[in-house]
Amino acid sequence: MTTAFDPVDLAGARLANRIAMAPMTRSRAQGDGRLPTALVAEYYAQRASAGLIITEGVQPTAVGQGYPGTPGLHSAEQVTAWREVTDAVHERGGRIFAQLMHAGRISHPQVLGEGLHPVGPSPVTPAGQLFAGTGLIDFVAPRELTAEEIHETVEGFARAARNAVEAGFDGVEIHGANGYLIQQFLATGSNHRTDEWGGPVGNRIRFAVEVVKAVADAIGPDRTGLRISPANTYNDIAETDTDEIYPALVDALEPLGIAYLHITEPAPEVRELTLALRKRYSGTLILNPATDGPTGPDALALIEDGTADLVAYGALFLANPDLPERLRSGGPFNTPEPATFFGGDHRGYTDYPAL
């Protein structure tokens, strides 16, 4: 029987175990350059015993930033700063992918600065507010991307992927989940376009597929992963055809031979779709399962029964930097505490002292 503590081949790369560290926003980049710091290197190095670390969301372009203090991978200075992080993880034997996250409409001019304005597939204002540095403010209507700008955005992902490899990352995960730009194109509630990028399912998956193709062409499919969150309503996402669009997306990805597909479940009832996608997708599947509270030891059974090849842990990894060893020994586990630095309504968690 396969267990979470067995090694696994990830598109030719050997991972020490099947426990992944899920991407989690930390907002620790400093200055106008959005540079990761020495604290970021220490943070990821502490968790290098994960089979795979997936970083916090990293904006591929300046206009892709969604929250204050998040890092980028679109400048030479950022590449240099990230090299310290990847070196620290590799020195401890870890593997690390950068998550490329374009927030799209989930941003604000106050966050972006430099005269930039949030963009999206359509000028649909998301409900709710976001933290812009000093407090919560209402979202604004995004500027609709032109067809030319969509192609430029796709190339922006590819450039960032090349930068990630130059910075020493083992690969990249494209963030197609949680209501950010790629899911905004997938969802009927945020994509009202009538051109080749909107309307029928085949058009609405086009942006996601083109980004994955561009990144795979830039750095190799063996270094490319995609994260999705079917039926997730986070960030005011409304999907009317979840059971149709995600199988179509997975079918389009199947021939590309990417390193993995990462599914995050917003609720237990999505499991049926997860299993259906698992059957359609022949590559490595990482699952961030729907749980009541932080994902716990019982999720390891998802590897044993074949539901997933790796299980991604979020909050529990923050509270327990040596999580794989604690899972192997059955604990004890520190309890993660919800963060309040984003107005008390953000999926982040407080950090704990280094072990």
Image (cartoon, helix red, strand yellow):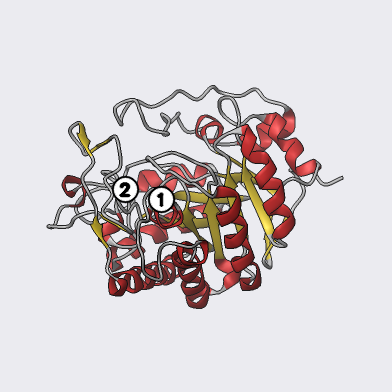
Label 2: which residue? 70
Can residue 128 be seen from the camera position used here?
A: yes
**In the picture provided, is 95 more to the left or to the right than 80?**
right
Q: CA distance from mark 1 to mark 2?
A: 7 Å
Q: Position of residue 352 (x, y in %)?
A: 45, 29
Q: Check the image and report above or below for 317 versus 204.
A: above
- Badge number at residue 57: 1
**Residue neighbourhood size for the residue with mark 1, other residues' Cα within 10 Å, grouped as few (<14), some (14–19), many (≥20):** many
Looking at the image, which residue sits at the far bottom? 217
Q: Secondary structure at mark 1?
A: strand
Relative to 237, 286 lies left or right: right
Q: Quadrant of residue 134?
A: top left
Q: Which mark is residue 319?
A: none
Measuring 31% from the left and 65% from the top, which residue is drawn there? Answer: 74
Residues at discs 1 and 2 in contact (Cβ within 8 Å)? yes
Amino acid at pointer 1: Gly
Q: Earlier in the sequence, mark 1 or mark 2?
A: 1
**Amino acid type for the residue under numbered disc 2:** Thr
Residue 207 point in image, percent of width and height: 44, 66
